[in-house]
């Protein structure tokens, strides 16, 4: 049994889809960003990073979408969510998910909440990330 901590309209949707596609037994726990619940002590006890998603597993808590997605794929190999027996295809999948997580998502966050990092609009580069995905990564 797993519990997925998520918030609406966030990257936690990827982990939710993977759990559904895997046929996993899981519960959902919604975190309310409108009240900044992600920063409150009860949720920080789940993820000190104050971000969603977080997945509570029988072995412990996982954060970071690429790690959660691979964990689900490995726990439910019959679902065929990842090319587990093809190192190159697996690495390409990891490259794509890592780009989404480490570059696109950060640029997206800059667009939404750029004031956390910079006060110069030129520093916000999410459009270039989408161009790369459309024209090269796909
Ligand atoms: N690198 C993390 C990013 C997690 C993340 O930043 N999630 C956003 C929602 S998409 C969040 O929780 N934001 C809360 C905030 O910025 O206060 C992952 O891939 O899971």
Image (spheres, rainbow, N blue to C red):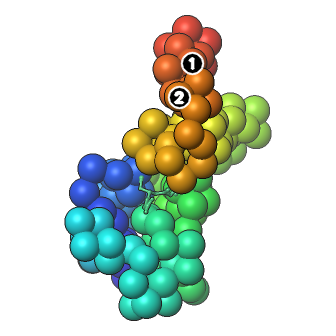
As helix, strand or loop, the secondary structure at mark 2 comes to: helix
Query: Assess mark 1: CB under 8 A from ligand 1?
Result: no
Q: Is residue 17 above or below residue 127?
A: below
Q: Quadrant of the N terminus?
A: bottom left
Q: CA distance from mark 2 to mark 1?
A: 14 Å
Q: Quadrant of residue 37?
A: bottom left
Residue 14 percent location from the top left of the image = 40, 50
Q: Is residue 39 above or below residue 114?
A: below
Q: Could you tell me how many numbered marks the image carries? A: 2
Residue at x 39%, y 90% (from the top left corner): 42
Residue 93 percent location from the top left of the image = 62, 36
Residue 117 percent location from the top left of the image = 60, 48
Circle on res. 121: 2
- Position of 55 with respect to 103 (left or right) is left
Q: Is residue 122 above or below residue 20?
A: above
> Which residue corresponds to mark 1?
128
Residue 128 percent location from the top left of the image = 57, 18
- Dot placed on the residue nearer the N-terminal end, 2 or 1: 2
Residue at x 29%, y 66% (from the top left corner): 33
Label 1 crowding class (10 Å Cα cut-off): few <14, some 14-19, many 20+? few
Residue at x 49%, y 89% (from the top left corner): 45
Residue at x 43%, y 90% (from the top left corner): 41
Label 2 crowding class (10 Å Cα cut-off): few <14, some 14-19, many 20+? few
Q: Quadrant of residue 38?
A: bottom left
Q: Is residue 22 visible?
A: no
- Position of 14 with respect to 103 (left or right) is left
Residue, far top = 135
């Amino acid at each position: 049994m797993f519990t997925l901590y998520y918030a609406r309209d966030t990257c936690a949707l990827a982990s939710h889809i993977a759990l559904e596609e895997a046929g996993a037994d899981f519960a959902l726990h919604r975190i309310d960003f409108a009240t900044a619940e992600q920063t409150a002590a009860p949720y920080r006890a789940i993820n000190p990073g104050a971000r969603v998603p977080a997945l509570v597993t029988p072995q412990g808590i996982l954060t970071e979408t690429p790690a959660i997605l691979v964990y689900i794929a490995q726990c439910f190999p019959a679902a065929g969510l990842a090319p587990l027996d093809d190192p190159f295809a697996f690495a390409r999948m990891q490259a794509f998910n890592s780009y989404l997580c480490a570059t696109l998502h950060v640029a997206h966050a800059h667009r939404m909440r750029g004031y956390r990092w910079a006060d110069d609009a030129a520093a916000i580069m999410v459009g270039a990330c989408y161009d790369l995905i459309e024209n090269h990564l796909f």
